[in-house]
Amino acid sequence: MFPDLPIVLVADDPLVRGGLTALLPDEVPVVRAVGTDGDIAVSVATSGAEAVLWDADHGAPEARQLDVEVPVVVLAADVDVAARALGAGARAVLQRDADGARLTACLLAVRAGLVVVDERFDELIRATHPSGDGPTEPLTPREEEVLELLAEGRSNREIAIALDISPHTAKFHVDRILLKLDASGRTDAVVRAVRLGILRL
């Protein structure tokens, strides 16, 4: 089907961990299953995982918890949790009742650098940026280049290398993009840019 996609599964309820593991195909092995109080970054680093699947049963994860080297998919119970998860740095949000096929497709998409928002959370996108509401000022061509790299999940250092600029300059461009799009974070900026038609994934 596709190259194996090992993941770290984060869920406080052992039954949920077992249920989600059973939903996923053999090509998406759960190499580590932990609770939300665990050190997720260490689990990722020591397991060889390429993504994290996070069940947000008791609220959205914090930004420090999502500060890992791989994309994170959050299963959210409602729009508020989904919005906070995106703002904290999640690459995707799905509803908690997503089936195995949907989970797998989403995990593959974030591994490929895409941002995924469940269509049932569409009101989140509309609330984040009402239709017709654009950036406070147009993005420059350089900022558009940086935005495309943000959508690929690149760090400031990776953006600097790709565009042959200093990390300081890369950070400046990222900050300007967040300001112009009135975004709470990098993922939020990508979601808003897609909604506005500035960025096509």
Image (cartoon, helix red, strand yellow):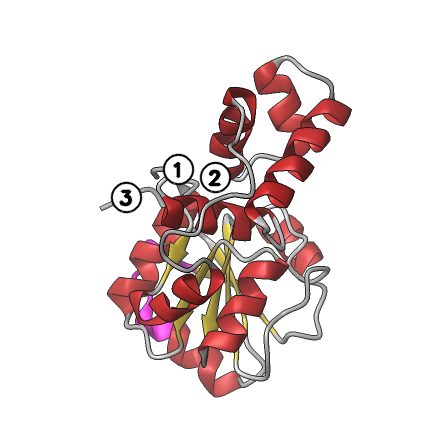
In the image, 74 versus 119, the foreground residue is: 119
Predominant SS along the magenta part: loop
Give the residue drawn at x 53%, y 75%.
81
* Image quarter hosting the C terminus: top left
Residue for badge 3: 2
Q: Position of residue 192 (x, y in %)?
A: 46, 50
Tell whether label 2 touches label 1 (CB within 8 Å): yes
What element does badge 3 sit on?
A: loop
Q: Which residue is mark 1?
A: 199
Highlighted range, magenta: 21-29
Frontmost residue, 42 versus 192: 192
Spot occupied by residue 64 in the image (x, y as percentages of width and height): 73, 60
Kindly identify which residue carries mark 2.
151
The relative height of residue 86 versus residue 137 in the rendered view (above or below) is below
For the residues marked 1 and 2, what is the alpha-carbon distance in whole angstroms? 9 Å
Residue drawn at the location 33% of the way across and 66% of the way down = 24
